[in-house]
Image (cartoon, rainbow, N blue to C red):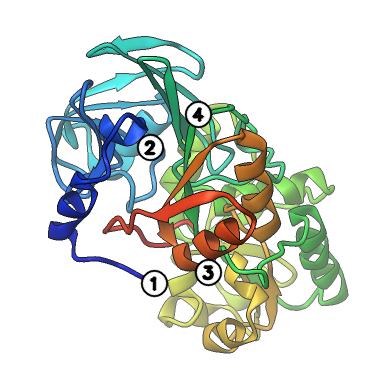
Amino acid sequence: MHGRRKAGSISRFYSDMRSLGVDRWLYPTDRGLYCAPADLYLDPARPVARAIITHGHSDHARAGHDAVLATPETVEVMKLRLGTDGAGRFEAAPYGETRTLGGVTVRLVPAGHVLGSAQVVLEWQGQRAVVSGDYKRAPDPTCAPFELVPCDVFVTEATFALPVFRHEPAEQEVGRLLASIARNPERTHLVGAYGLGKAQRVMRLARDAGYDAPIFLHGALVEMTALYERLGVTLGDVRPVPLDAKPADFAGALVLCPPSALGDRWSRRFADPVTAFASGWMRIRGRIRQAGVELPLVISDHADWPELIATVTETGAEDVWVTHGRDDALVYELARRGRKARALSLVGFEDEGE
């Protein structure tokens, strides 16, 4: 991450900046973004007494908090990934439901990132801050679409905050995948896709495009995919790859796996597969070479550069805080456009969902 400060200095850096603005009651600490009157943290990097979790990816949802507030879907994802004892107490808050914590009005609205992902809307003494978590504006049949909320302060990610990142429509990229399957009926198509969100999105888009053959899954994707099904996302005929699978059994088949499995022993059971990787990073030639895939698919669950700029503008926020990613580039561009912006340089965030 560019421009990162040591975590221990973050609070000192902001201590002289809290005046009458939102940053007198919402500010970064070495544990994460802290809402003082409600005494809670948002996506904290370390265990805390009370946390609001925006979504289930591991760089945002960690074990060990005394109490967790999240959408019902994110609660289920966390229980699956971290165990039912992953927090002292889980509290599910459906989208749009308002509650008051320490005088702060809190509600969760859709972020469009993955199933259950939420923005956190915080209102206190006439001021409103929206903490986006990770988000995208592109349509996704596996989760609720991003909801724009006007605010005084917008806290945004910046995973793909460079002008080079302009994502193609995911439907177009899945169309390329299905066209390749049709052209190569003798070859297995092995697609690397992250297990929470990306894999299920690829499957659902394939179904929406008319693909009705069985889709086979690496074992690491089976439980999360089953959870999506239980939560109402229909994915059709989905099967685990059998342990005794033979190459001939998968001629012309679509198989999904974690990206890390594309080059390991597991993938060798498929004869001459077409390897693909579904990720926003497939916009970059160096990343394609690094991944060593034949069919790069630019499918991202994060906002691209135009979406980031448009979202910040449409919120009407007077102040923009950037949590993680290419924060320096986004702050520079917003300043160039006459908008107040700052990098929070929070620790602990990666790109698990990409």
Q: Is residue 123 left or right of residue 197?
A: left
Residue 282 figure quarter: bottom right
Q: Earlier in the sequence, mark 2 or mark 1?
A: 1
Q: Earlier in the sequence, mark 3 or mark 4?
A: 4
Disc 2 target residue: 77
- 10 Å neighbourhood of mark 1: few (<14), some, or many (≥20)? few
Which of discs 2 and 4 lies nearer the camera? The answer is 2
Residue 234 figure quarter: top right
Which of discs 2 and 1 lies nearer the camera? The answer is 1
Q: Are marks 2 and 3 in contact (CB under 8 Å)?
A: no
Between marks 1 and 3, how big is the CA–CA gap? Answer: 45 Å
**Whether residue 98 can be seen here:** yes
Between marks 1 and 4, how big is the CA–CA gap? Answer: 40 Å
Q: Residue at x 58, y 87 (%)?
A: 286
- Could you say whether the residue bearing mark 4 is in a helix, strand or loop? helix
Disc 3 target residue: 245
Task: Look at the picture and state if 345 lies above or below 77.
Answer: below
Which of discs 1 and 4 lies nearer the camera? The answer is 1
Q: Are marks 2 and 1 in contact (CB under 8 Å)?
A: no
Q: Residue at x 45, y 12 (%)?
A: 97
Task: Look at the picture and state if 210 lies above or below 253.
Answer: above
Q: Earlier in the sequence, mark 1 or mark 4?
A: 1
Residue 18 figure quarter: top left
Between marks 3 and 4, how big is the CA–CA gap? Answer: 27 Å
> Which of the labelled discs sits on residue 2, or is there none?
1
Q: Nearer the viewer, residue 6 or 79?
A: 6
Between marks 2 and 4, how big is the CA–CA gap? Answer: 11 Å
